[in-house]
Amino acid sequence: MDREQEEIQFLGFFGILKESLTIVSSWRKIFTQITLALILPLSFIYLAHIQISELLFSKIMLNEFILDRTAEGTRTHDRISGALSSEWATFFLFKIGYFVFFIVLSLLSTSAVVYTIACIYTAKEIAFKKVMSVVPKVWKRLVVTFIWNFVIVFAYNVASLIALFLGAVLFGSVPVIGTVFLILFGVCYFAGLFYITIVWHLATVVSVLEESYGLNAMSKSQALIKGKMWVSFAVFFVVGVFFFGIQLIFEFLVVVGDGEGVGTRVGFGIFCLVLMSIWMLFGLITQTIIYFVCKSYHHENIDKSSLADHLGGYLGEYVPLKSKDVQLEQFEV
């Protein structure tokens, strides 16, 4: 982050990735500590949930198969039916518990990484204990932003289902037109969902570094992306592809693991855990770099001294940046 603010806007796809790698290598110690404390447990929970979900769901499917071939009214049918009810309840409770823990650790990890990079940007002294003491205070703001993102995604899915239903009614009777509609609908739906995801990721950075959070952070993030949409899209797309690539490797080598011994599967599991942790860290860093790139592109010159003061906090408490400090003045080039 030694570049002048006016130069950051010229970072393209490879420039953002290179800058992210440079930051990781230059501040290896602090990011290793953050990874071990937050991101490694986050990755473990994510991968473990895939394995446990598969075990629970496989047992449910087996009992469903047996139930379909068991005569109704028999003791065996009643016993299997009761077991299935209990297994489905366990499955959904597990999913809810996983979701809560994953979101909490994810927001804590985001807070830690964004705060650390901001300290690097302002040349402020960084200590792991200091970062961890600030994280819980920043995290509360991210929760509000996450809730608004959840509401937006929910509303988007409801609107999409309504559009899909209307399309099926209008075009379902004509196979060719119906097929074209489904393809166009699928493309538009996933493009819109990916756009919301990008806005959400930048909104988390805004929530940490600025006074805006919640819906205001989402709105500000949307404005920041303008002009850097394709670069942001490309970076987040690559990060997402590698993320799901690691997940597929884990599912194929560990969850399925046909013909592999327990030791081999454990080894592959550890490998995927380390790989996932590294990639999650890299993804959090890239989204923060994109934030600074977008700020620079819109000629919003961040006051480093004000940023440093607010990161340090007043009387040891975290204080978010005010609009006059981070919203920045517009200037002509």
Image (spheres, rainbow, N blue to C red):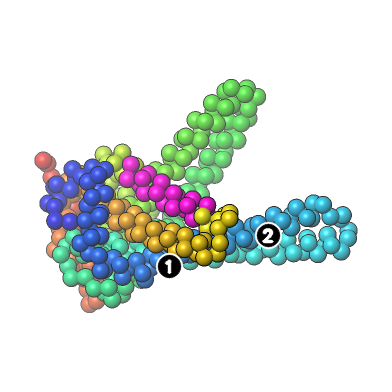
Q: Quadrant of residue 147?
A: bottom left
For numbered disc 1, what is the local secondary structure? Answer: helix
Query: Which amino acid lies under the numbered mark 1 shown in the image of this protein?
Result: Pro
- Quadrant location of the C terminus in the rendered image: top left
In the image, 214 versus 205, the foreground residue is: 205
Q: State whether the magenta stretch is mostly helix, strand or loop.
A: helix
Disc 2 and disc 1: Cα gap in Å?
Answer: 27 Å
Residue 183 lies left or right of residue 239; in this view the side is: right
Is 160 on the left or on the right of 87, as rendered? left
**Which residue, given by chain and number where applicable, does mark 1 sit on?**
41
Total residue callouts: 2
Between 288 and 17, the residue placed more toward the observer is 17
In the rendered structure, find residue 59 and report the number of the disc placed on it: 2
Q: Is residue 293 above or below residue 132?
A: above
Tell me the magenta residue range. Answer: 234-252
| Callout 2 amino acid | Lys
Q: Is residue 118 visible?
A: no
